[in-house]
Amino acid sequence: MALIVQKFGGSSVANAERVMNVASIITQTYSAGNNVVVVVSAQGDTTDELIEKAMEINPRHSKREMDVLLSAGEQISISLLAMAIEKLGFPVVSLLGWQAGFNTTSSHSIARIKNIDKERLRNELDKKNIVIVAGFQGINKYDDITTLGRGGSDTSAVALAAALRANKCQIFTDVEGVYTADPRKVQNAKKLLEITYDEMLELATLGAQVLNNRSVEMAKKYNVELEVLSSIKRVPGTIVKEAETKEKMLVRGVTKDTDVARVSIITLPDTPGIAFRMFSKLAASNINVDIILQSVGRNNTKDITFTVQKSHGSLCKQLLQEAFPDITDDKIFIDTDVAKISIVGAGMETHPGTASQMFEALFDVDINIQMIATSEIKISVLIESKDADKAVAAIHHSFFPQD
Amino acid sequence: MALIVQKFGGSSVANAERVMNVASIITQTYSAGNNVVVVVSAQGDTTDELIEKAMEINPRHSKREMDVLLSAGEQISISLLAMAIEKLGFPVVSLLGWQAGFNTTSSHSIARIKNIDKERLRNELDKKNIVIVAGFQGINKYDDITTLGRGGSDTSAVALAAALRANKCQIFTDVEGVYTADPRKVQNAKKLLEITYDEMLELATLGAQVLNNRSVEMAKKYNVELEVLSSIKRVPGTIVKEAETKEKMLVRGVTKDTDVARVSIITLPDTPGIAFRMFSKLAASNINVDIILQSVGRNNTKDITFTVQKSHGSLCKQLLQEAFPDITDDKIFIDTDVAKISIVGAGMETHPGTASQMFEALFDVDINIQMIATSEIKISVLIESKDADKAVAAIHHSFFPQD
């Protein structure tokens, strides 16, 4: 008998009708002869409403009390979903994080799962119950409630699947799967039937926003087969798993990220270690630097250009100017009108033609490339943000010509 | 150092402003040098909103899942109240039922507290924390969440006060204390400074609705001194405690209960045991019978009249007619236009004049008495419901003449 973990996000259980829809997906899986463990997030806007209540009373509340407050959201959704399954006549039990054995680190609001005590879960499965688990929450060693931070319910689901050695972990969302490009923007975007963990990680980072990165990393580490699929339209989704054979180069998708600022510093003195010290400084303030380009300037100087998140642009300038008085206002420039366009696919490094095909597609529609970065499974270019959608369409058309 | 338990109901924490008000009451008590443990109910309409969500999905939900759902209400209110206390700069921690050690019987929705494991509570008090405990909830031996039923937060507070041997248990409500009559109806109603447990129990049963009966019973059993007082108007309330000396007769209050139906069955055959069998039948369907009057009728028959809750009137008729075919429609009558008026006070049985003073007050304003019942500390009469308010005013005026 197979064990399947299913995860439903907040929009999938936003109202009574959707809760009933989710209950019917779960009971169909159960009726097909599977053991089913379900992870569910708080309903639709519940979390935002609770945050608003807290901010009204005390914007500087402790994280401990915020975790107590927010975890009530999943407590509501698990019991309502259990009631919906009871209505369909199936045996079911809802479990809070602590009841389902989720032991986490102590840090409130960003706790990590340390281990899952499986005893209660196993007992409920042995009783043939459908088990509904509150996502996003656990308890720390002081028996205090903790939450796992953004995307926490995905992580809860993958951790459960790993702990219970589930045959599959299905992540239900409001899209049908992972696409070759954003289907709302690119008409010919195609749904992928399969994708590797690494490819999914690159796509997630680049803004596909289907699956939380931590959960994909965990799935890779414990080799949990993931499926991303729609809770509304009952069609096969995208399977995320380890590549079985080294297959031929396949571009999996084209993505756009406009949350980017380009920082350029010109005529820096060419002192050894200056780049290292600059990036250490930024790292200390949790500023992630992405594409980096360094070029030799004139008169023993060099120019450094790199990208950061858009919201970090001005902080970046401030930090660097504090640390390096040489970097005067005429030597540092922040450009926020940029976008990063990427193609993702396993085996890219062995197919040098892929990069030139991408650049050619951009050249054909008169788009200028500002920066280029490549990895084993990804090629990214920085362009002006006004060209972003045109660039995605052109690249997509080149790699996925009209059927 | 004294330990004080304070309980605040849902209306006392209905919005951010009221939560801040409650926080200020608590921190004043703490600043005066007391250890403070607080029990709080779910905010204002939260419980009703949660019930509505459940009914929309499945009106025949299990009680187990309903307990998971409803207990989220106090989880929200304890964390918000803790945040309000943090804002005032005091050390505070919120605890859910299971964290505060509330072990209950297994029966969902009507669980009883078995014991309170005081370890965590003691630790938090040793750390000088103000401790905010979720009322109304606990866990059973299966580690499942249970709720204590109606008025459960009062019971939680009294149980905590008993377990921690608190010096006092203060129940904050939206009235200033216990009155000699309903202050909204009777202009001269006076607040009582003290009252005994037994008197309070009679007043609660009769509809004064200030304190839940179970909590008064528990306070009496463990000799917990209670104070009923307002969370809005900061004046002394009413102390509920054991009578210290056998004092002279004092009528404590006049109450009205209009949730009454009178059932009359006439010309029953005078068979031994028929009354017993009738009342067993009703008890089996959880119908509580209150005042009973039996009189000998004509020709070896008897008449039986009794009162039940208004909503039980027609069910009562149906059950009796099913069990006793002799009771035809011309022999059973239900009158719902009745009200029960009572006076309550310790030592009533030793003051026969009290009853006649009550009857005289009614006679003076032309009110006819249909039935009479007396106990050691209470005298009740049944009258037409249209006369109820007039009767309360007349009796109150007789026992509490204008100052």
Image (tube, coloured by chain):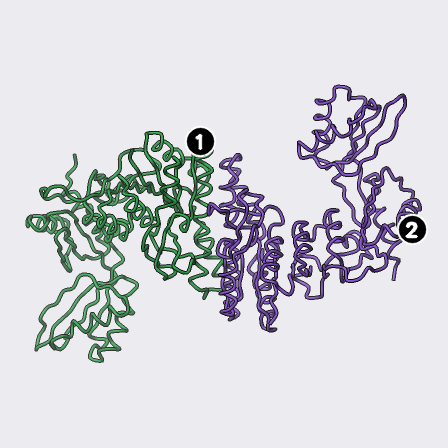
Chain colours: A green, B purple
Q: Amino acid at mark 2?
A: Gly
Q: Which mark is residue A88?
A: 1
Q: Which residue is mark 2?
A: B353
Name the foreground residue: B90 vs B306: B306
Q: Secondary structure at mark 1?
A: loop
Name the foreground residue: A134 vs A49: A134
In the visual, does B68 lie left or right of B293?
Answer: left
Mark closer to the observer (2, 1)? 2
Quarter that holds the N terminus of chain B: bottom right
Q: Could one spot residue B229 in this view of the protein?
A: no
Which chain is home to disc 1?
A
Q: Could one spot residue A400 in this view of the protein?
A: yes
In the visual, does B11 lie left or right of A234?
Answer: right
Q: CA distance from mark 2 to mark 1?
A: 64 Å
- Looking at the picture, does residue A298 appear above or below residue B350? below
Q: Amino acid at mark 1?
A: Leu
Quarter that holds the C terminus of chain B: bottom right
Task: Say yes or no: labels 2 and 1 on the same chain.
Answer: no
Image quadrant assignment for residue A81: top left
